[in-house]
Amino acid sequence: MKVTKTQLNTLTLAATLIFTVFYTSCAPQAHNSQATNDSEISSQDSSHIVGGINASTTFQKENGIVALAITSSGMSGGLSICTGTLIAKRIVLTAAHCLQAAPMTKISKIEVYFINNIQRSLNIGNAQNSILADKMAPHADFLKDVTEETVNLKGWNDIALIRLKSDAPATFKMAQLPQASQALAVVESDKVILSGFGIASPIVNKSETNTQTGKVEIVGVPEKSETAGILRKIEGIPVLKELNADEILLDQTNSTGACHGDSGGPAFVKQSNGSLVQVGITSRGTNSIGNCNEKAIYTRVSSHLAWIEKTKNSLISAK
């Protein structure tokens, strides 16, 4: 669920149907607020991931949640936002589709931010609270053999790792992933906690008939105020079922849950000791025009533990 700055307040859709379900929206516009510090965002604020609250700095650091500002250059270049989790001092876990550049473009820079409000940083070009990525590794089988007919019959392998040029701040803990020995299962009726830097509006698009061509087109629905770029969380999102061996399906029909800009972000399960284990990675929604009020599909972390470990070690040792 990427956020793009090239078309403010407008959902940027990929050329094929398969990508219309990815959460893609716009980065925040310039606004009149003063500089935002970590302490200015408290868990008591009333803003939403969609239907949630602003996440505190403590929540962010305890669970290793970061923002990705992805710059691409070329014909359709611009700035995109995704979410990720820190799983080693220099390794961030996110979604593979966050690292896919549009046709005729290429990713030129990824800045990983360690603050819970990046709106002002993006508006003024301030990278002070970020670390550049120097390597990225999307899953080699991302979207392999996925067609309109098989769209949800098999997992999309929508998972990726990126490497930071230097260690993350010492105040940030690593997201806790399931252990292979745990066999942590996410089953129907479980409730998960979602978090991400995405927008707070579930309706971002509408279908309209072009009066000149007579064709139905998808057009963006502007937000009343910019909400992307602020870390939010929501609890109690129901797991509907295992969609396939590698993905889970979450219920967002109450217009609560993940949306554009939350791509790559975590779904957590709370343990008996109160700690959170990341069981999912935000991949996409099921609404055909990209709205966030139906269901959400998450990549299952436990299905990719071997890939994560192998790829993490390769990135750490790479020159």
Image (spheres, helix red, strand yellow):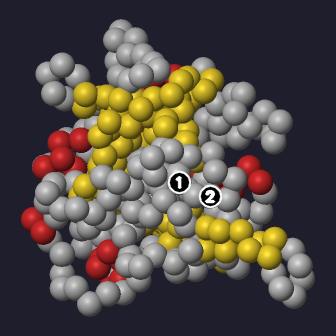
Q: Secondary structure at mark 2?
A: loop
To which quarter of the image does residue 24 belong? bottom right
To which quarter of the image does residue 239 belong? top left
* Residue 49 at x, y percent in the picture: 36, 56
* Residue type pointed to by label 2: Gly
Q: Secondary structure at mark 1?
A: loop
Category of crowding for the residue at label 2, using alpha-carbon neighbours closer than 10 angstroms: few (below 14), some (14–19), many (at least 20): many
- In the rendered image, which residue does mark 1 sit on? 292
Is 92 placed above or below 259 here? above
Spatial CA distance of label 2 from label 1 is: 7 Å
In depth, the one of 134 and 229 nearer the eye is: 229
The mark found on residue 290 in the picture is: 2
Which residue corresponds to the image point at 89% horizontal and 82% vertical from the top-left?
213
Q: Is residue 314 left or right of residue 18?
A: left
* Residue type pointed to by label 1: Cys
Q: Is residue 53 left or right of residue 30?
A: left
* Residue 27 at x, y percent in the picture: 45, 73
Residue furthest out toward the left: 39
* Residue 215 at x, y percent in the picture: 87, 74
Which residue corresponds to the image point at 32% horizontal and 36% vertical from the top-left?
236
Say if residue 283 shows up in the picture.
Answer: no
Category of crowding for the residue at label 1, using alpha-carbon neighbours closer than 10 angstroms: few (below 14), some (14–19), many (at least 20): many
Marks 2 and 1 close (CB-CB < 8 Å): yes
In depth, the one of 46 and 37 nearer the eye is: 46
